Image (cartoon, rainbow, N blue to C red):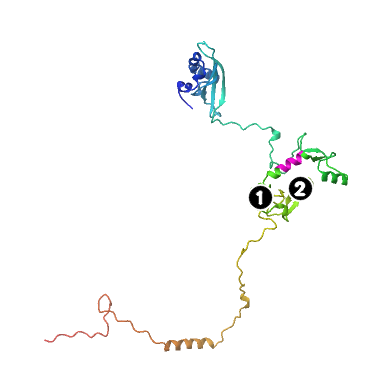
Amino acid sequence: MTGSTEESAAATVAEWPDELAAVFTGAVDQARAAVEEFSGPDAVGDYLGVTYEDPNAATHRFLAHLPGYQGWQWAAVVAAYPGAEHATISEVVLIPGPTALLAPEWVPWQQRVRPGDLSPGDLLAPAADDPRLVPGHTASGDPQVDETAAEFGFGRRWVMGPWGRSEAAERWQTGNYGPDSAMARSTKRMCRDCGFFLPLAGSLGAMFGVCGNELSADGHVVAKHYGCGAHSDTPAPAGSGSPTYEPYDDGVLDVMETPPGSQAESVETQAEASESSPEPPEPPEPPDTPESSAEPAESQPEPTEPPD
């Protein structure tokens, strides 16, 4: 964005009081001098314009020529009061322009680990106040879990509480193996009726199970209303496979040797057949022209001399 001082200030001069408009728009050289004093003359580029801040302040911007700051701008803020003859430099800062390359938004380290980042050998401890976990000696809220723990007389130090199970159910319900996924919408058969569906225990078993089909969602938690084309009741397509033919077995063929005298008799029979067959007619002789024959025919008589 480049342009003259008059063009850049034309859109904002109406925002200033009349007595300050000329002061702000005429402070370009003063703003450039302040930026050059701060950064050096080689770091200041083209003038980019002036913008309105408030009735008593304006910002003049210049292109920044700094290594590593492509697209950044120098901003010099000037201020004045009604009746002032010149503006005062308030501050000089380096700001990103619309095409500046910026660092990604800061993410705290404890929030940087995402699903799928854990690899073999990594250690990932839960947060000290993880809301998904509750002490195991208290009731988990799942009657079947509590009943089983009490029956066997043991329990875990931490178990998933109602909030943690609800959060997991929400992820599974809206994930790739939920009822609204593209795979589930492409079929009418559901996992709840599939022979490969292994229901979960506890309260989550009312909605979810694990797929046991190695050719489908093997080992993944799937919703009961999820479905795929590998359902156990999927019928085989009619007419599929290769057409049926009788096998060819060359082992059932009888190989017989030709008797010694039969070959000679076959040759004689062929000779007799060739003798008894009529000979084909001879082709007509070509006309007596030099082009048709290179030698004269033997049947033509020699020419005689004419009588005296």
Location of residue 146 with respect to 275 vertically, above or below: above
What type of secondary structure mainly makes up the magenta span? helix
Q: Secondary structure at mark 1?
A: helix
Residue 121 visible, this orientation:
no
Location of residue 77 with respect to 167 vertically, above or below: above
Residue 276 visible, this orientation:
yes
The boundaries of the magenta stretch are 163-170
Residue 172, percent from left and from top: 71, 44
Along the viewing direction, whichever of 115 and 208 lies nearer the viewer = 208
Q: Quadrant of residue 134?
A: top right
Q: Residues within 10 Å of mark 2 (few under 14, many from 20)?
A: few
Along the viewing direction, whichever of 259 and 227 lies nearer the viewer = 227
Left or right, 222 with reference to 261: right
Q: Secondary structure at mark 2?
A: helix
Q: How many marks?
A: 2
Q: Amino acid at mark 1?
A: Ala
Report the Cα–Cα distance between label 1 and label 2: 18 Å
Task: Reply yes or no: does residue 167 show up in magenta.
Answer: yes
Q: Which residue is mark 1?
A: 184
